[in-house]
Amino acid sequence: MPQEAIVCYQRAVQTRPNNAIALGNLASTYYERGQLDLAILHYKQAIACDQRFLEAYNNLGNALKDVGRVDEAIQCYNQCLTLQPNHPQALTNLGNIYMEWNMVAAAASYYKATLSVTTGLSAPFNNLAVIYKQQGNYVEAISCYNEVLRIDPLAADGLVNRGNTYKEI
């Protein structure tokens, strides 16, 4: 029923053009449908209405990254962190970009920062484990995979990756 959601959000915006939440929800619906240009447009409109709209900055960053505009995505994540320095998704997203760029030390610092401000997220532990394993630090890698599995005992990636790490020792 995404089309019905789009109609509702569009009507809300027609009624109140500066409704940042409706614009953000509209953008998110477009993002989920893979309509990234429309998502980007509406996230920008949401931010224009509310320059403190953290999730719009973070989600705009995701959409920009997905269309290959990585430098702009980094700016969005950094703006999110300017408004809320401990925003876990922005920290993780920056870590992911630096990991893709093979800037392992920078990636690790963002993943560690994520873990220092939140609990219950397994992805930063998994990402750190990958880094530690690449560095040959198997003890730390296994420790991180253990945390992944403590958070989500059925995490298949965590189980496989931990098994692969044990296999390499």
Image (cartoon, helix red, strand yellow):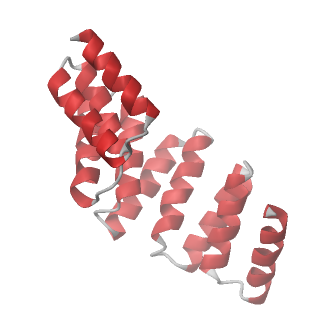
Residue at point 29% right, 52% down?
Answer: 114
53 relative to 119, above or below: below
Q: Position of residue 19 (x, y in %)?
A: 64, 83
Residue at point 29% right, 45% down?
Answer: 150
Q: Quadrant of the N terminus?
A: bottom right
Q: Is residue 1 left or right of residue 69?
A: right
Residue at point 20% right, 34% down?
Answer: 143
Name the quadrant containing residue 149.
Answer: top left
Q: Position of residue 156 (x, y in %)?
A: 45, 32
Please state which of residues 100 and 156 is positioned toward the viewer in this rendering: 156
Please state which of residues 21 and 71 is positioned toward the viewer in this rendering: 21
Residue 41 in view, yes or no: no
Residue 58 in view, yes or no: yes
Q: Position of residue 128 (x, y in %)?
A: 28, 35
Q: How many marks?
A: 0
Please state which of residues 156 and 95 is positioned toward the viewer in this rendering: 156
- Quick one: which residue is furthest to the front in this view? 153
24 relative to 63, above or below: below
Q: Is residue 52 left or right of residue 110?
A: right
Residue at point 26% right, 36% down?
Answer: 146
Q: Quadrant of the C terminus?
A: top left
Q: Is residue 127 left or right of residue 75?
A: left
Q: Is residue 125 left or right of residue 169?
A: right
- Quick one: which residue is furthest to the top in this view? 168
Q: Position of residue 66 (x, y in %)?
A: 59, 42
118 relative to 83, above or below: above
Please state which of residues 138 and 81 is positioned toward the viewer in this rendering: 138
